Amino acid sequence: MTTRASAAGGFRQGAADPGPPGVDGSPPALRAVRDIAAAPESVRRLDVVGPGGHGKTVLLDALATAFRAAGITVRADLPSDGLDAAEALLVDDAHLLDPAVLADLRRLAGLPGGWLVVAHRPWPRSPELAALGAVLAARRAPVVLGPLDATGVAVRAERLLGRRIEDRAVAAVLDRTGGVPLLVDRLLTATDGEAGLVAQLGYTLAAQPPAVNELLLHLAAGAPLDADLLGLGSATELDERVEAAVAAGLLGADGRAIPIVSAAVLARTPPATRTAVRRALAERALDRGGDVVVAARGLLGSGAAGPRMAEVFTTAGDALLRVGAPDAEAMFAAATAAGVPPLVVAARRAHAALVRGDGDAAIAEADRVLSAADQVPREDVALAGTVAAAVLARRGLLARSAELYRYVDSVTGRASALAVPVLVGTGGPVAAPPSPTGAPTLLAGAEDLVADGVRESVTGSPTAALSLLTRAAAMMESDARAVLLPDQPAALAAIVAVHCGELDVARSVLERALRARMGGRGAAPRHRLLLGWIALARGAVPAAKAAVTGVGAGLEPRDELLAAALEVAVARRTGDLAALMPAWGRAREAVVRHPVDLYMLHELGELAIAATRLREPSWVAPHLDEADALLGRLGDPPLWAAPLHWARLQAAILAESRDEAARHAAAVGRAAGGSRYAAALAAAAPHWVRMLDHDVDAEAVEVAARGLHAVGLAWEGGKLAGQAAIRTRDRKAMSALLQTARALQSSVPAPDVAPDAETPPSGLAAVTAPPREPAEEPSGPLSEREREVAALLVDGKTYKEIGEQLFISAKTVEHHVARMRQRLGSTSRGELFAQLRQIVQ
């Protein structure tokens, strides 16, 4: 209870609840004074300072309890002749006491005997309170109560809720409350969430002076602590208001707004008043050339209009566009609603829509500008053309994109490096680098590096190309304008890295791009799908499948083709014919919508294999012809040609076309000098052709398989060794190749990945007699190998498919099935399947 010494402030006699514990179980700040009962007379004086809601009263109640437990009397009045040795006086809210009472307390603080603890807010600080504080501080350092940190919030949550909460929940509470202990407690225990606390705070705010509420409203509306912008007469007046709000626990110690307090302020302010305050702030900031974004965001949807508001929204949109914020487009839409002619901001709206990942809106706004090019400034035409070109590139229309870049160059009067990737991608001439013009910005530098890297990939060193593109990606990590590029440097670097066999580099550059949100929302699906393609190359089929499902639907045509090819590849490698058919349907539609370009050759190669597997090669034949023509125009660059010829070799093997297989193997061999990746393919290619003639050089195959593994193609290497193993008649060589295949298979990152389960062509007959395998100790009714065969058999796999997956022949599978049937006593195929399901499930 409290006995008042005046109308405000008072002496504390104690309370039943000792209050919230600190980190070590003591009340907040009690650790600094827990030994006060045993303190010598010289330090029996204590000054406690803290804003409202920071625990001063809780601390005094805890001290009262501690004093009583030590046999010390807690007085409820101010003694006229000093405190006895076994008496304590606890004073709360001393900042509200009358000057005469403060003078008496100062006199008492200078007398010997007893304990005196005075608690007060840091403001208002009268001369009498300052004098009292000086006397108290001369005996002992004041205890200053501040906000809770993350650890303090976690401890409070555990005490109040009886359980620990997650770190992100701690961070959210800390962010919303600014760590003010009272607000933390109320938010943690609110039964109706934040809304209840906001309503509670409304009553607290109603008791504040008008000047404090006015300050809090302006800060909630986004105003900085600037006397001129707030319309105050002087900085001194602003400081007084800030001190009052901080002392009340309604502002942070640094003067920053507390989010939940701001929410309460706005909730109790009528809408018209909120809009008027924000409008005034925005207009003042606009006049001074300051930041109008926060005020403009608050005005969205308010209906604010007129020339001044149109200028505010346009300025805010420009500021947001410079940093790549997704709500820039909303600002330009608001500017149009406020009275700006749509054509004036159309180019910027196109750019903002591209940042947001809305290609349809971006190209619509860009086309509005291009259709009225003689009515808008030249820089708007250039921006609109650049946006449209970037969107068309994302949709796989590189030829049309190149036309737009050439048009932009004619408008600006200077050659841009942006056109180089799209020109080269369509097999256009690899022109000399344009002379640098304009300011050497990050974007311009990245454009030049991308152009040089793409040229180098066609005419020079793959390693140099990869270096240039990786540097371009690093340069654009911090620049929101990367969204204007026809393809992200990270994506191009990853594609080149895959073609070089540098899968770790590819993964690293893509992960960095995703963390930096390079290229805006529209670029993220491409980066994720390329990561899936890298996982596929390594044989990590589940990760590749997750990449496809993770990006969802509604992709741009370029990304849709990549996703469809990846889905086909996953189904093909797992031998899942039921999944392959719908995936192939999706891929057929995607490939029809996407013209052939240099950057989709990997996907095209995968679809060529699947088309042959499904006996529908006519669907990709025209695209393969286009790819041949494109590569021919570029001089058959080894970096780009080798992977496509490798895929076509695999398709030819499936079709049992020896001449076609030999042709593509020879093409892969000619590209061997392009990179170590191409060299690994070239070393392996002849062995696939020789297998068509039942000719297996076991030692050379093993070297080639390990070479594929060395450039990241663990699955390809395992497949080569496995296929060679079931086609050789040399049992010793078979055993060695099987061991190699399994070793390479086990190196795949995902342990549950199965190798390709395609049915081999009939011309590649497996050995007649099953190879002998090491004796296996049965585990239950079946051996471990028999359980593997049984699981695949129950899944509906054929003998050939099971053999492909386990690197054994179909005859060996048949032998295992016969042995299982005999061991289980099955009298029919149906009975065998029923028994196997019970065993393997």
Image: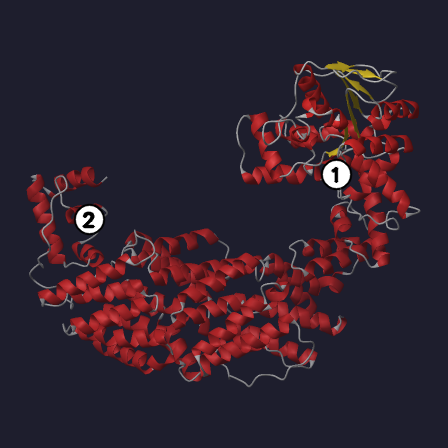
Q: CA distance from mark 1 to mark 2?
A: 63 Å
Choose between 235 and 658: the one closer to the eye.
Answer: 235
The answer to whether residue 477 is seen in the rendering is: yes
Quadrant where the N terminus sits is: top right
Q: Please give the label number shown on residue 788.
A: 2
The answer to whether residue 597 is seen in the rendering is: no
Image: 241 above or below 185 = below
Image: 295 above or below 668 = above
Q: Amino acid at mark 2?
A: Glu
The image quadrant that residue 209 belongs to is top right
Instruction: Using a 10 Å C-alpha cutoff, classify the residue at mark 2 as few (fewer than 14 neighbours), some (14 to 19) or many (20 or more).
Output: some
Quadrant where the C terminus sits is: top left
Task: Give the x, y percent position of residue 222.
Answer: 77, 47
Choose between 470 and 584: the one closer to the eye.
Answer: 470
Q: Amino acid at mark 1?
A: Ser
Q: Secondary structure at mark 2?
A: helix
Q: Which residue is label 1 attached to?
A: 262
Task: Give the x, y percent position of residue 793.
Answer: 19, 48
Residue at position x 72%, y 16% from top?
A: 14
